[in-house]
Image: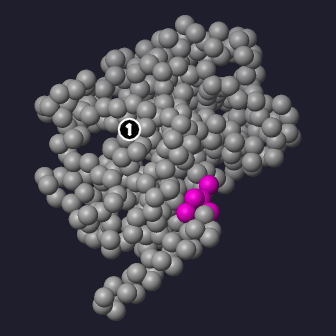
Amino acid sequence: MTRNSLTAAVVNIFLLLLLAAFPSAAQISPMKPFWKGKTTCNESVLMVSKDGGPPEARLLFKPKRILRVSDSGLGKVYEKGRDWTFENGKLKLLPGSAAISMTDRELAPDSGRFARIGGGYVLHHEGSFFHEKQLAVTYRHKKKLWHGPLPVYAGDVLAAATDKLSNKKDLHILLFGDSIAAGANASGKSDVSPYLPDWGVLFVNRLKEYYKTDIRFTNTAVGGKNSKWGESEALTSVAGYHPDLVIIAFGMNDGTGKMPPAEFRQHISAIMKQVREVNPAVEFILVSTMVPNPESRFVGTQRDFKKELQELTGPGCTLVDMTSVHDELLRHKSYQDMTGNNINHPNDYLIRWYAQFLAGTLIPGEGL
C-alpha cells in the first residue's frame, strides 16, 4: 500500500467513526433548508451507466469534501476509493463497487406501460423501487450556491394563521390535492428506511417545532385526481372539515390531460370560493406542481399553471412555486435523482424541498 492510499484509508476510517459516533453529522434534520449553510445532507442520486461507461451522477453543488455516500435507507455506507470516486464534476462508481446502479437501457426498456418520447418506453415503478436504486450523499460546499427561487415569508398575507401560531391558538391545517400531496413514494408511505413522511407532515412538524405549539393537520389528497374533481369535492373534502389554513396542490394530472390554464384557474378559484362561503376567514397556500419526466408523454400544460395560481393570490392567499424550484434543480441534476416513480412523483429528496418551501412561508427568515 502506498503512502497516499494509506492516508486515504485512514481518512475514510476516521470519517466512518465520526459519523457512527455522531449520527447527526450524517442525518441533519430533513427540514434544514438546502439553500442554507455549507453542508448538504442526504442528497439523492441515481447512478446511471451510459453506453457501458461507469455509473455516474451529478450533485447539486460542487463539493469541497464528500463526507458520506450511503444507500437511500442510510444504513449501508460506501467507501471512497473502493466503491466511488469524484472526478470531472461527477460522482462515479468504481469497478466492483458494492453500491447499486442502473443502466440507460434499463431506464428506457423496449416494452412497458408508458411510451417514451423518441421511442421505446419509460421505466415506471411505484412503491420503493426507485428509492432503493438511489444513493444518499452528504457533502460540504461553499455557502450561497443556490441561485434558484427562495421561499417568500407570507406572515402578513396569512395574517390569521400567523397570529394563531405566534399566540399558540388552535390552528387546523388541511392539505387537498393529488398523489403528490398524498405522499406517494415517500419512504414512510412505502414502509422502508428512513421512513420519511409526506411533505405535509414534515411542514406541520416544522411549524410545531418553531412555534412550540400544537397544530391539527388533515390530509384529504387523493391520488390520480385533478382540480376539476377537487371542485366537485371541495365542500365535502375541505369545507366540511372547517380548516383555518388550506393548502391546495393540484396540477400534475391536470397538465397531463392538457387542461387549458384558464380552466385550471377556474377550478382552483371555485374550490376557494366554496370553502370561503363556509368560513370567510379561511386562508390558502396554493402550490404549483413539480414537472413530469421530460422523456414521458405526461408532459403537458403543467408549467403554465403557476401564472394562473399567482393571479389568485392576495390577502389571505399565497403561492409556493415548486414548478420553478424543480426546473432549477433539473438544470443541475437528472430527473431520476429526484423521482419516486420515474414519471410524476417526488422522492424523499424532492419531498424535503416541498416541505422546506412551505415552511418558509410561515417561518420568518427561513428563506434567507
Horizontally, is 315 left or right of 79 in the view? right
Residue 117 location in percent, x, y? 18, 31
Residue 191 vertical placement versus 210 (above, below) = above
| Residue 115 sits inside the magenta stretch | no
Pick whichever, 255 or 225, lies toward us: 225
Location of residue 71 (image quadrant): bottom left
Location of residue 248 (image quadrant): top right
The quarter of the picture where the N terminus appears is: bottom left
According to the picture, the residue beneath numbered tag 1 turns out to be: 129
Horizontally, is 299 left or right of 24 in the view? left
Horizontally, is 51 left or right of 222 in the view? left
Q: Residue at x 48, y 47 (%)?
A: 349
Residue 271 vertical placement versus 17 (above, below) = above
Horizontally, is 98 left or right of 172 in the view? left
The reply to whether residue 191 is in sight is yes
Q: Residue flagged by tag 1: what amino acid is it?
A: Phe
Q: How is the image coloured?
A: one colour
| Residue 28 sits inside the magenta stretch | yes
Q: Residue at x 65, y 16 (%)?
A: 238
Residue 277 vertical placement versus 317 (above, below) = above
- Highlighted magenta segment, given as a residue range: 24-29
Pick whichever, 208 or 104, lies toward us: 104
Location of residue 33 (image quadrant): bottom right
- Categorize mark 1 by other alpha carbons within 10 Å: few (<14), some (14-19), many (20+): some
